[in-house]
Amino acid sequence: MNKNRTAFFISDRTGLTAENLGHSLLSQFEGITFNRVRLPFVDSAEKARAAVTQINAAAAADGQRPLVFSTLILPEVRGIVEQSDALILDLFEMFIVPLETELGQPSSHAIGRSHAAGMNYNSRMDAVNYALSHDDGGISRELNRADIVLVGVSRCGKTPTSLYLALQFGIYAANYPLVPEDFSGGEMPPALKPLKHRLYGLTIRPERLQQIRTERSPNSHYASLENCQLEVKQAESLMRQSNIPYLDVTSMSVEEIATTIRHQTGIKR
């Protein structure tokens, strides 16, 4: 059997829901390489027919049916896509029909309703702007506005985690790097002392930190294993001494880090 398959993620909006759930399902099948194709904004019959052409072309090229993860809402558009030569996994229909039965009323079948019902877009963008302007201690003022301040050594994952928390959940997240000057004093930088109850630490294994830093500054003292070992040791010691919770993110994705932080701290917007 061919161990290469094409998987389409098709939606009338961004396709993120179909893609995220599809990725989770496909991750359970080891040994198969999936060529992943996202088809967003398929919200008309014309676009649906174009999608069918692309799906059928993949079927002909692969010699086997592609997998199609769909969150299409409009019946007309969904009906066209279902005519393609593929295994159609209609995620919308899979859940909406049982819900209609249980709740005793039909759904609205309105495109984009999940985004409208979710967190206000402007609020999330404000949080993203805040995270960007308070990245790596760039701005110390207004730190009191932060819902959480991530601390840790340089390149341990503070920036992507801050941005993810902001973009996905509207959480005002700042991050502040712990540098050798902070370790000599044995206490958190002055700007962070009033925010102790909002601090959360990230740490990472020195070997992984060395790999990350080497990509940015090869053959430097900053990226040397010895320096990485020292900084991680001192940062963890400082966080323990200051009674700040911290998390080893070495083998965690940004999504896992953010979820763990939200679960442990209870922060939300």
Image (tube, rainbow, N blue to C red):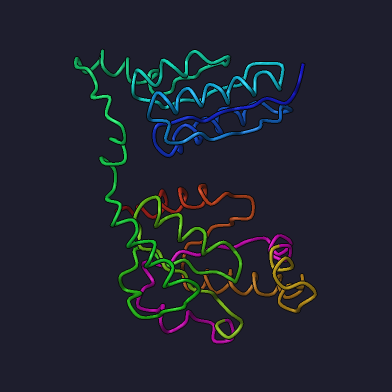
Kindly identify the residue that appears in the image at 45 percent across and 64 percent down. Answer: 200
Q: Quadrant of the N terminus?
A: top right
Residue range in magenta is 183-211
The residue lying toward the viewer, choosing from 148 and 142, is 142
Left or right position of 169 against 61: left
Q: Position of residue 35 (x, y in %)?
A: 66, 32
In the image, is residue 246 above or below residue 114? below
The residue lying toward the viewer, choosing from 13 and 17, is 13
Residue 185 magenta-drawn? yes
Q: Quadrant of residue 218?
A: bottom right
The residue lying toward the viewer, choosing from 228 and 81, is 81
Q: Position of residue 159 (x, y in %)?
A: 51, 64
Total numbered labels: 0
Report the residue that reaches farthest toward the right: 219
Kindly identify the residue that appears in the image at 63 percent across and 16 percent down. Answer: 65
**Main SS of residues in magenta:** helix
Left or right position of 159 against 234: left
Q: Position of residue 110 (x, y in %)?
A: 27, 29
Residue 99 magenta-drawn? no
Q: Quadrant of residue 55?
A: top right
Kindly identify the residue that appears in the image at 71 percent across and 30 percent down. Answer: 33
Left or right position of 212 against 75: right
In the image, is residue 141 above or below residue 13? below
Kindly identify the residue that appears in the image at 36 percent across and 18 percent down. Answer: 76
